[in-house]
Image (spheres, rainbow, N blue to C red):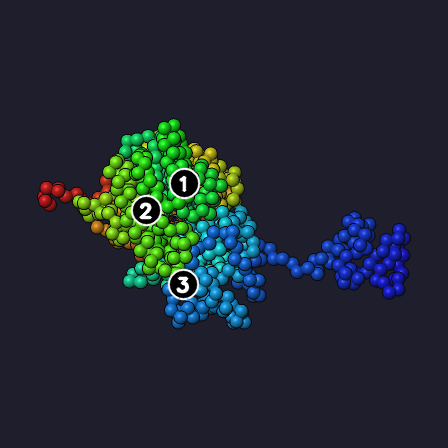
Amino acid sequence: MRKELIEGEDYYLSDKGFRIFTEKYLLNRGHCCMSGCKHCPYGFSKLIDQIKKKTKPRTMTFQEEILQGIPAELPSKALYDATINHAPKRKEILSAEEKTLALRNALRYFEPQHHETLIPEFKEELEKYGRIYMYRFRPKYRMYARDINEYPGKSLQAKAIQMMIQNNLDYAVAQHPHELITYGGNGAVFSNWAQYLLTMKYLGEMTDEQTLVMYSGHPMGLFPSHKNAPRVVVTNGMMIPNYSKPDDWEKFNALGVTQYGQMTAGSYMYIGPQGIVHGTTITVLNGFRKIGKEPKGNLFVTSGLGGMSGAQPKAGTIAGCITVCAEVNPKITKIRHSQGWIHEVIEDLDLLVDRVKKAQANKEIVSIGYLGNVVDVWEKFDQENVTIDLGSDQTSLHNPWAGGYYPAGISFEESNQMMADQPELFKEKVQETLRRHAIAINKHTAKGTYFFDYGNAFLLEASRAGADVMSENPTLGREFKYPSYVQDIMGPMCFDYGFGPFRWVCASNNPEDLQKTDAIACEVLEEMIKTSPVEIQQQMKDNIQWIRGAQENKLVVGSQARILYADAEGRTNIAKAFNDAIAAGKIGPVVLGRDHHDVSGTDSPYRETSNIYDGSRFTADMAIHNVIGDSFRGATWVSIHNGGGVGWGEVINGGFGMLLDGTLEAEQRLKSMLFWDVNNGISRRSWARNEGAVFAIKRAMEAEPLLKVTLPNLVDDNLLN
Ligand SMILES: NC(=O)c1ccc[n+]([C@@H]2O[C@H](COP(=O)([O-])OP(=O)(O)OC[C@H]3O[C@@H](n4cnc5c(N)ncnc54)[C@H](O)[C@@H]3O)[C@@H](O)[C@H]2O)c1
């Protein structure tokens, strides 16, 4: 190689005639001889790589991004992505002074040097959307549940929580991902992106000697605790009771000081619509059993294809009936159709009638999404004498004035406009529609339809609207014409015996792990049913059938999760078998949890506790005891919420998450906590004189000598009367 420097140029000539540039030259120009040779014999490709590394700013790894929290430098302003499903504009509720307070509150997350830039932007968000979401701070990485090992941190438990948070915000899972809403229109994981960034950072740096304290989406901080304490304690929407009306949520949420956590949104335990498919399948199956009909060839009419309600047609198909589910939102209808949750979409009422009559004649198993208002379906089917066997509704009536329930006769777009600009008129239209809705349902039930309230506050809101839904002979707890699904089905058949929506997530995010856990759970239940008492044989059979078909039904959206209704014994046995399999290296870690809609987690007089008839359904001691009890018996995280399902101020509900890592400590925790987490509710249901619960708690006392529960004495009615 010749080494002389050619004058005026920063390169040498090699003996083969290649020009060899100096590093300075390359750094200045960013390339070598420009001949495009990728395999330079003098190693230039390597040099070029080094130069690229030196000259190009290095992009942060996923872990580094999490650990930086709120970035020191402002990220570029985010564009509003119209292809994503967004939360409707919230109603104008703050005074001018309160708007300034909302801005001041939002700005406390950021260094003062950024305030000047952020003030107009946040102001615009508040004016345009009714909330400050801080869109600019939305992370650029893909949002989904990764393998637990990909998260940064010193605590495996905290990594599990990071994974669960990301799952709740996954675009495939969340209803309004950019507004941090997982389901139910207002079920928030956080109120803004600064809270998300800070929380993930805290989780990424905390140890097992600390607990993260979450105040309604806001991470208050890390506090010293101990390794047997929960890693995270969540409260959502805890209000002074007198400030717990729907407009209080609007106001205090807009101020950025509280949020509506729904049930599994703000507690990081949502697993997509699968979470409710199983419960809905049980409800539909038992609904048909109740009226003595086979599902095949018979019709179930309902509405809502949203976060939870979207499970209905799938459940109808698994149960084996014809389902008609009305939905006003075209985007959501399209998503559910593309996901295969509905087989067909029909937009014309006459076509719908013809299609349903054909399906009834041919005894088809089919689910039809009707793009339009559900009230029109009920009315049309009455006019055309279409027999409805089962009827319900799952619009979001827990949130009637902000997009949960759309009035008939007004387009979807017009409704969205009206609820923001003319909220009083919108409210009138909603109530008018509810009255029409009830009239149409009453006509069908007079012809034999079995109608039930599906835990969406339908009967409650309809009654408030003056609709004809009140019973002619009301008794305490049976004030409405129609039962809630908990009163007739879920309460006496499942909750009173401890059966509830137990769930798990494979933290490896590996579908093979899910298959293995399904097989383990099935094996456990098949063993248990051999000696189960007759009172719970049907529940056990339904659950075994469910878990056998779970893979085939392709229910996974987001994380590798499974739901399975099980009682205390079933949950404990399955969890123990998982922990053993983790210890044996057969599967990776598993996160246990449940829906709040369960035996003990939720006090909700018109839903979960609607089959409590001793007057205590308006108390919330059970839910509060549950979360306290779970927290000192080994939960990895616990949560307690005001609102969820039936509305702000109408329910108190809580849940937990627990990481199984194959250790002996995990085994001790699962045994201690799951026993309490179910038997707390059974004891309360038993004290309310619920027959199934008295049976179940006596059985639990036989199995566990340390359990001593006060049992009720029954009084002779003749003495009282
Ligand atoms: N029974 C249960 O086990 C259970 C469980 C969870 C939630 N819920 C309740 O069910 C309700 C629905 O939950 P979600 O998560 O699906 O809410 P969601 O807001 O995601 O879905 C409701 C859907 O109803 C549609 N809708 C509203 N009004 C309509 C109308 N008049 N006609 C046709 N479609 C209409 C909306 O466009 C929306 O897509 C909520 O009140 C929720 O609290 C019940």
Image coordinates of residue 400 in percent, x first then y, are 34, 53
Q: Which mark is residue 348?
A: 1
Label 3, secondary structure: give it.
helix
In depth, the one of 313 and 115 nearer the eye is 313
- Give the class, few, some or many, for how many residues have Cα within 10 Å of label 2's Cα (few <14, many ≥20): many
| Label 3 vs 1, first from the N-terminus | 3
Q: Height in image: 329 above or below 535?
A: below
Please state which amino acid type lies under the numbered disc 3: Ala
In depth, the one of 225 and 90 nearer the eye is 90
Residue 250, image quadrant: bottom left
Q: Who's the residue at 31% across and 62% down the image?
A: 243
Asked whether residue 493 appears in the rendered view, the answer is: no
Q: Is the CB–ligand 1 distance for label 2 below 8 Å?
A: yes
In depth, the one of 148 and 478 nearer the eye is 478
| Label 3 – label 1 distance at C-alpha | 39 Å
Image coordinates of residue 221 in percent, x first then y, are 45, 63
Per the image, the residue denoted by label 3 is 254
Asked whether residue 256 appears in the rendered view, the answer is: yes
